[in-house]
Amino acid sequence: MRYSVVILSVLLALTTHTNAQSTKGLGKSDPEAKKILDGVSAKFKTFKSVKANFSLAIENAAGKNQGTKTGTVQMKGAKYRVTLNGQEIFCDGKTIWTLDKAANEVQVTTLDNSSGSITPQKLFTNFYDKDFLYILNEEKKVGAKTIQVVELTPVDKSKPFFKVLVEVDKSAKTLMSTKVFEKNGNRYTYSVSGMNTSGDIPDNVFLFDAKKLPGVEVIDLR
């Protein structure tokens, strides 16, 4: 599976809403954990644009590292661009272009603006509100930083994962990592570093221009 697809699959798992479910009778979330998650969401929404490095590490059920891939993500409003190992995903808020450089082809789709749409922005905002119960697991020191660990469990037990650990920088109120535990034993750790929120990313960064890649095959799936 392509690693960009893995990332989007993790995002889909985290953000797809299950409106038919209810937390009633399933226990209550920890108010302190909600304060932490709400703080991350509120802080992220104040940024005009964001550029960050990320890594995706995958472990199998035996705990063996299946590899780590790195990339960058740029976000501005509903727009985003993900660059990862020969692939790029562009989104101008309406259209998504997924470029496979090795195959020299790009697939074009329409962004679904429903609540269950897949976007990197969802990972930094209130994806947790309707679909999870959550508790504050621990606080720990990593260097000079105090990290708060929030454990989330899905309300919908048919999800392919049973637990998500979110690590938050307590002082900065920014997301450090998200670790997804699948029922089959696989674990996906999505870590963020080098976040830059001070610049203003030009809108054309989020547009795919076929003229810059002569001979690229455009597969329009809209």
Image (tube, rainbow, N blue to C red):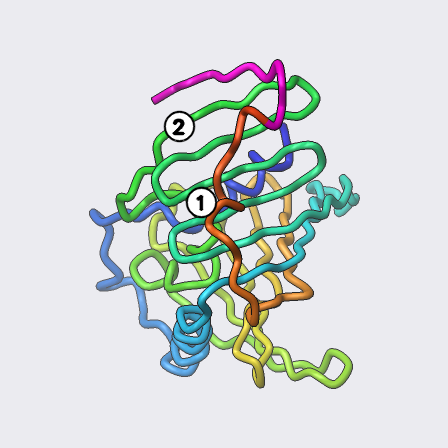
Q: Is residue 179 left or right of residue 150?
A: right
- Toward the viewer: 177 or 83? 83
Q: Position of residue 209 (x, y in %)?
A: 52, 31
Q: Quadrant of the C terminus?
A: top left
Q: Are marks 2 and 1 in contact (CB under 8 Å)?
A: no
- Toward the viewer: 162 or 205? 205
User: On residue 46, which mark appears?
Assistant: none
Q: Position of residue 217 (x, y in %)?
A: 55, 14
Q: Position of residue 134 (x, y in %)?
A: 42, 68
Q: Is residue 212 left or right of residue 62?
A: left
Q: Is residue 186 left or right of residue 21?
A: right
The amino acid beneath tag 1 is Ala
Name the residue at 34% across, 55% down.
Answer: 155
Name the residue at 45% across, 75% down.
Answer: 43
Which class describes the residues within 10 Å of circle 2: few (<14), some (14-19), or many (20+)? some
Above or below, 13 against 127 in this view is above
Q: Find out whether residue 64 is within the magenta segment.
A: no
Q: Which residue is mark 1?
A: 13
Q: Find out whether residue 216 is within the magenta segment.
A: yes
Label located before the other in sequence (2 or 1): 1
Magenta range: 212-222
User: On residue 109, which mark appears?
Assistant: 2
- Toward the viewer: 70 or 65? 70
Above or below, 81 against 124 in this view is above
Above or below, 39 against 163 in this view is below
Which image quadrant for residue 114? Answer: top left
Name the residue at 59% across, 69% down.
Answer: 167
Q: Tell me the mark number nearer the camera, choosing from 2 and 1.
A: 2
